[in-house]
Each structure stands twice: as C-alpha cells, then as structure tokens.
Image (cartoon, helix red, strand yellow):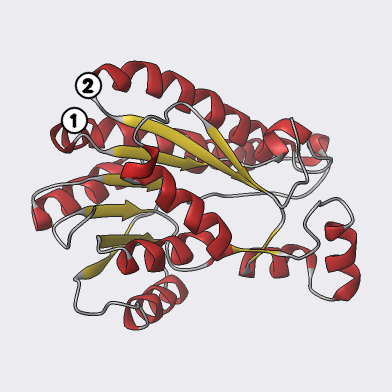
Amino acid sequence: MPTDSHVAVITGASSGIGAAAARAFNAAGYRVALAHEPTDEARRLGAEVIATLPRPEIECVGVEADLLDPAAPVHLISSAAEHWGRIDVVVANAARTFRGPFFETELNEWDAISRVNVRSTWLLARESRDHLLSTRGSFIAVSSVLATLGSADALAYTTSKAAISGMIRSLARELGPFGVRANCVSPGAIQTEREATLHGTGRELDESITAHQAIKRRGQAADVAAAILFLAGEDAAFITGQDLVVDGGWLMR
C-alpha cells in the first residue's frame, strides 16, 4: 500500500484526466507533482486542483513543464526527485491534438504533436528510469482507443497514440527484468474540458457517443483515473506491457 512517502509525477494535471488522476493518487496517499503548461490559465487551474485535493495534509506541488521543450521532462523529473528524494510512479498524460483533414495538417503542427505526445513520453521514461528502478515503480502512459479504431480528421493525434502503445510494450520488455512495470490506458470518449472545446456539449453529442458503447452513460475522467491508479498499485503487480481500455465497451477485442 502507498504511504505519504510515495511520489507520483503526472503530466497534463491541471485539468481533465490528469487532474482526476492527481486527485485519485492523493486520495490513495501519494505525494503528487502536478505538471502543467507554463501559462496563466494552467497555473490557475493547477492551483485549483491542489486546493481541492481530498487529502490536503499530503504535500502536492505544481511544476511548470512545456513539453514542446526537450528540457522540460528532465526538469520535471529532477525537480520531483530533488524535492522528495524518490519517484514511484510516472503518468505520461499530457497530449496535444489537431482536428482537420490530414492533407491540411501543417508540418509544424505534426511535429508539435509528435514532440508533446511521443517524444516527451520517451523522455519521461528515460529520465525517470533510475528512480523507478530504485523504487521498483511503475510507468503509465495515456494512449487512446483511436490508436486501434483510427479517426478521420485526427491522423497526427491517432498516429502519436499508436506510437505510445508500441512504446509501452518495448518499455515493459526492457524494464521488467528490473522489477519496473510499464502499461498504458486507452480512454474512449471521456467528458472533459477538452471534449467540450473540440466538440461542444449537449444531449445529441452524448447520445451519438453512447450509441457505440455497451455501457449507456458518458465516461468521466475519474473512470480513467481509477484505471491508472489500479495499474500503479500492488493489485496490478503482475501486469505489464498492457493497454487497459476504458471506454464503456466501445472497442472490444
């Protein structure tokens, strides 16, 4: 069982799935480093997450990290390790997306999605390796059901998520002999602030999504956070290299 000496590092933690994961890990007894973009809005949201954590007596801190910058994962991991002296779990959740036909995707946007979604995940794994070996910890990335389903108008994002799923399998092979596990979760259509920005809200949207699902309710960020917390914990001690789909039964394989 985690104690308040255990440390989780979570990217994209100022909103959505990342914020829900921060709450779940805090409630389970982890100290949490909440990474977020270096913007006024992300700082405000991150501060709100920290102020409303269920166990405020356990120290949690916000860390600014622009994952377009290859130095950001290094800074994030080193900051958490220096502050607390250990890292037990890394959750690579932050992501960038673009909606539009693949032939209209600009090169700089393709590269930005790759840097944030794929390169930063690799760098987080690389920089946290020694810490996770020391604690026999866990590395968890967030992929997407789109990596399997595909998606019109989201080719760059879908490609990046497929890369993450493959990366996790390779990490599991390399880290497993040292007692470190690597897994990913693949959310389906989850109600988050990002979904509202991209697709709006309303009954029509909800019904169009639940029509694909076996479970006839909308998925919440807390549903995904619970899966991430499970993969980090002792109950998943013999699980590695897996992609846990959290989609209400949209994708079945």
60 or 96, which lies in front? Answer: 60
Kindly indicate the quadrant of the structure image that contains residue 69. Answer: top left
Kindly indicate the quadrant of the structure image that contains residue 222. Answer: bottom right
Task: Report if residue 219 is visible in the image.
Answer: yes
Is the residue 199 above or below the residue 145 in the image?
below
8 or 193, which lies in front? Answer: 8
Badge 2: few (under 14), some or many (20 or more) residues near its Cα, within 10 Å? Answer: few
Residue at mark 2 to residue at mark 1: CA–CA distance: 6 Å
Disc 2: which residue: 178
Kindly indicate the quadrant of the structure image that contains residue 40. Answer: bottom left
Disc 1: which residue: 133
* Type of the residue with mark 2: Phe
Task: Report if residue 122 is visible in the image.
Answer: no
Q: Are marks 2 and 1 in contact (CB under 8 Å)?
A: yes
Q: Quadrant of the C terminus?
A: top right
**Horizontal side of residue 246 vs 204, given as left or right:** left
